Amino acid sequence: MRQALRGLTTRGRAFVAAGITASLCALLLGQKDLLRVGILLVALPVVAALVVGRTRLRLQVRRSLTPNQVPVGSSATVELALSNQGRMPAGLLLLEDRIPYVLGHRPRFVVDRVSPNWRRTVSYPVKSDVRGLFQVGPLMLTVADPFGLVETSRTFTRSQHLLVTPRVHKLPEIRLGADRAGSGENRPRAIAAAGEEDATVREYRDGDDLRRVHWRSTARRGELMVRREEQPWQSRCSIFLDARTISHHGHGPSSSLEWAVSATASIGADRIRRGYVTTMLGGPTTLSAITHRSAAAVHQPLTTQQLLTECATVEEHKYAEIGPLLSVDRFAQEPSLVIAIVGACGSDDITALNRWRTSQATGVAIVLDAASWAVGAEATDKAARLTAATDATEHELRRNGWRVARVRRGDQLATVWSGLGLRSGRIA
C-alpha cells in the first residue's frame, strides 16, 4: 500500500491536493456538497492505490535475440514471450524494454487487460551504426489504474547482450614477402640447416613458464632457452592498432578510429583465413594486460570470432606513447609479418615499432593522415602540424624498411591493401 501511494502520478497528486483544498473550503463555508466532492477526490487515488497495490502478477518473460552478433548497420530482432502464470487478472500494464539509444527508441507496449493464463509475443528490431557490446533489457513493467492516478514499476533481472562488430571488408590477395617464411619448401630447408632442436627453442623472456625450459640447449648455449609453443613452420602475424586519443580525429562512425578498427578487423580476418597464427595488440586485452601485468592473454592466437569481439570493444585511450602497448607482446616465436595501423608517431614511437618488428619479419604500416578527418576549428588549428607529423612518420618508417601506405579520409581499404603488395618499403 505504501509503495502504491508513493506511485501516485501527477494526476493522482493533483486529485489529492484538490480534494483536501475542497474539503477545507467546505468546512469553512459550511458547504456539504463541496465536502462530498472533496472526499471523492481524495478517495479516488486511495482506492486506485489499494487496487494497484493488491495486484499480484506472476508475469513470466522469455527473451530471444536473433542474431546476437551483427555487423555495423545490420538489424537484429528482439522477441519477448509474455505469459501470466497467476490466477489473478490485472488491469492496465505498460511494458518498456531498456536498450541503449544507439540501438533505437526504447520500445513501449500497452496491455489493457491481463487475464489468467494470458499469453502474448511481441518483437521489435534493433540496429546500430556504432560498434560495441550493448545490453538489451531488462524489461520494466508498470502497473497502472484505468484513470492514470497510480503507477508502480517492477523490473525484471534478465537481459542479453548484442555484439555489433566493425565492418569487415574483403581484401585482394597480395604477396607481402612474409608468405615465404611460414609455409612451402623454404621453411623445412631452413629447419634442416639449423637443426630441429635449434628451430624449436628460443631465448627465455620474462614471464615464460619455467616448465618450458630446454635444459640441453641451455647448457650448450650458456643462456636460458625455452621450448616454443607452436610448430616452427607456422606463419605468424601480429597486428597493432594505435587507438591513442592523440592519433585520431573525427567523431562517431566517420572518425579515423573507426576506419582503423575496421581495417584491423578486415586484415586480421584475412590473415586468419589464410592460415596465419594471428595476435592483436592495442585493444582491450592489451590494456588489461598492462594493468594486471600479465601478458598471457595477449599472445594467445585469435580466432576470427575473438578478433571481431576484440575490435568491437576497442575504445580510445590516453596513452601518450606506443612503447608500453608493444612491450606486452610475448609471441612464443617471432612473427613473420607485423602490421601496424598508426597515426602520427614521435621518435620514441618509431623506435618501439622497429624494436617490435624483428629483422626477419616483414613490416607493413598503414599511416592515418588524421588531419583529413579533422573538421571545423579542429581542422584549422591542427591541420598543418598533423600533416607534418604524418609526413615524418611515413618517411621514418620507409627509411627503416617498412612497407608504408598513407590513408586519407575516403580511401578504400581494399585499394590501400592492394597497393601495399606492389610498393617498396625503402626509399630509393
Image (spheres, grey):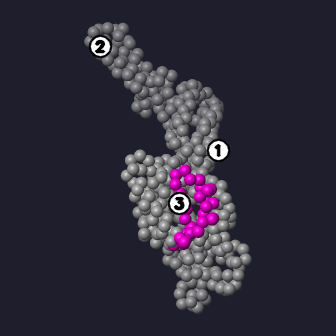
Q: Is residue 209 above or below residue 142?
A: below
- From the image, which quarter does the C terminus lie in? bottom right
Q: Position of residue 197 (x, y in %)?
A: 65, 85
Residue at 29% x, 13% y: name it: 25
Tell me the distance, in whole angstroms, between the alpha carbons under discs 1 and 3: 39 Å
Q: Position of residue 285 (x, y in %)?
A: 52, 62
Q: Amino acid at mark 2?
A: Cys
Choose the circle earlier in sequence order: 1 or 3: 1
Q: Position of residue 199 (x, y in %)?
A: 64, 82
Which residue range is magenta in the image? 400-428
Residue at 51% x, 72% y: name it: 400
> Looking at the rendered structure, which numbered label has been put on residue 66?
1
Q: Amino acid at mark 1?
A: Thr
Choose the circle earlier in sequence order: 1 or 2: 2
Side (left or right) of 27 relative to 142: left
Tell me the residue that label 2 is attached to.
25
Q: Is 180 part of what is drawn in magenta?
A: no
Tell me the residue that label 3 is attached to.
406
> Looking at the rendered structure, which numbered label has been put on residue 99?
none
- From the image, which quarter does the N terminus lie in? top left
Tell me the distance, in whole angstroms, between the alpha carbons under discs 3 and 2: 81 Å
Q: Nearer the viewer, mark 1 or mark 2?
A: 1
Q: Is any part of residue 131 visible from this angle?
A: yes
Side (left or right) of 237 relative to 143: right
Q: Secondary structure at mark 1?
A: strand
Q: Secondary structure at mark 3?
A: strand
The local crowd at label 1, few if under 14, some if 14 to 19, many if 20 or more residues have their Cα within 10 Å, is: few
Q: Position of residue 165 (x, y in %)?
A: 58, 51
User: 131 and 90: which one is in front?
Assistant: 131
